[in-house]
Image (tube, helix red, strand yellow):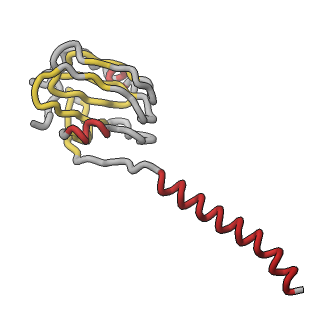
Amino acid sequence: MRQTNLSRLLPLTAAVLLATACAAGAHAQTPQVARFPTTQLNIGIHLIKAEVAKTEAEREQGLMFREKMGENEGMVFLFGAPAGVCMWMKNTLIPLSVAFMDENGVILNIEEMKEQTLDSHCARRGATYALEMNKGWFKQKNIKPGTKIDGLPR
């Protein structure tokens, strides 16, 4: 009788241990979502809570692996000086719009970006900043090239 009970418990114990190990392994492989310091930007009457990506590593990470973003939240990228910059959506789970800006915060162009693609979306000329928002945000607010964004970090 004891042997029969033990033989019934071994497969169950093995199954529980396997499930626990798989869950721990899956958890260990879940990418960490980096959060960066924030600043407040404004475009006319619109206030934006923007995370600031200023180092190369922060710019490379960007909004990767985020599952959602608040309505008036975004990420501002600082490039330091006007440069030919492009953005892509590798490992980015939410569709975004990006506004490229000159050194004065004036929007050069706005591009719509599809999630999880390697398509390049580039500034039309040297950009000092880029601001990523939820897809369609700029269009919904009637914000177009030539509009100035205030409060950009230096």
19 shown above or below 44: below
Residue 72 point in image, percent of width and height: 32, 36
Q: Name which residue lies at 70% across and 68% down.
A: 14
Left or right of residue 91, residue 129 in this image: left
Q: Quadrant of residue 110?
A: top left
Residue 42 or residue 24, whichever sits in front: 24
Q: Name which residue lies at 39% across and 20% down.
A: 119
Q: Quadrant of residue 87?
A: top left
On-image quarter of the C terminus: top left
Residue 130 or residue 87, whichever sits in front: 87
Q: Name which residue lies at 47% across and 51% down.
A: 30
Q: Name which residue lies at 18% across and 14% down.
A: 125
Residue 57 point in image, percent of width and height: 25, 41
Furthest residue toward bottom? 2
Residue 58 point in image, percent of width and height: 25, 41
Residue 67 point in image, percent of width and height: 45, 41
Residue 129 or residue 89, whichever sits in front: 89
On-image quarter of the N terminus: bottom right
132 shown above or below 25: above
Q: How many marks?
A: 0
Left or right of residue 56, residue 21 in this image: right
Q: Quadrant of residue 128?
A: top left
Left or right of residue 56, residue 104 in this image: left
Furthest residue toward right? 1
